[in-house]
C-alpha cells in the first residue's frame, strides 16, 4: 500500500515540478521522505553486522584455542587473570 502511495506521490511530484515554488518542492520532498520510512533501518543493519562480527570472532578464537591447545593471546590472558586476582 505504501509503495503505491510512494509511487503515486513521485509521479505527481514529477508532473508538477515546473508549476510549484521552492517551498512547495521542499514540502513534497519531506512528504516523500516520510513515506519512504527507511530512516532508522541503517541502525538495525549496523547492529546486526556488529553482532555477527563479534560472534564470528569469538568462534574463530575458540577454534584456535581448540586447535593449538595453548594460549593464543598471552597479553589478554594475563590482563584477564589480573582482573580476577582478588589477592591484590
Image (cartoon, grey):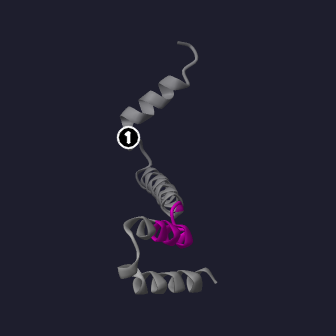
Whether residue 17 sits left or right of residue 83 in the image: it is: left
* Closer-to-camera residue (56/65): 56
Against 7, residue 35 (above or below) is above
Element carrying mark 1 = loop
> Who's the residue at 37% across and 33% down the image?
75
State the residue position of label 1. Answer: 73
* Closer-to-camera residue (13/52): 13
Q: Which residues are magenta?
A: 27-40
- Is residue 25 covered in magenta? no
Q: How many marks?
A: 1
* Closer-to-camera residue (50/44): 44
Q: Position of residue 47 (x, y in %)?
A: 51, 56
Neighbour class for label 1 at 10 Å: few (<14), some, many (≥20)? few
Q: Position of residue 49 (x, y in %)?
A: 47, 60
Q: Quadrant of the N terminus?
A: bottom right
The answer to which image quadrant residue 20 occupies is bottom left
Amino acid at each position: 500500500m505504501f509503495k503505491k502511495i510512494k509511487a503515486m506521490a513521485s509521479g505527481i511530484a514529477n508532473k508538477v515540478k515546473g508549476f510549484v515554488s521552492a517551498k512547495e518542492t521542499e514540502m513534497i520532498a519531506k512528504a516523500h521522505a516520510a513515506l519512504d520510512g527507511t530512516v532508522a533501518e541503517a541502525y538495525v543493519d549496523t547492529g546486526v553486522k556488529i553482532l555477527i562480527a563479534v560472534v564470528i570472532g569469538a568462534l574463530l578464537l575458540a577454534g584456535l584455542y581448540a586447535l593449538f591447545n595453548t594460549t593464543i593471546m598471552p597479553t589478554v590472558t594475563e590482563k584477564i587473570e589480573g582482573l580476577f586476582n582478588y589477592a591484590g
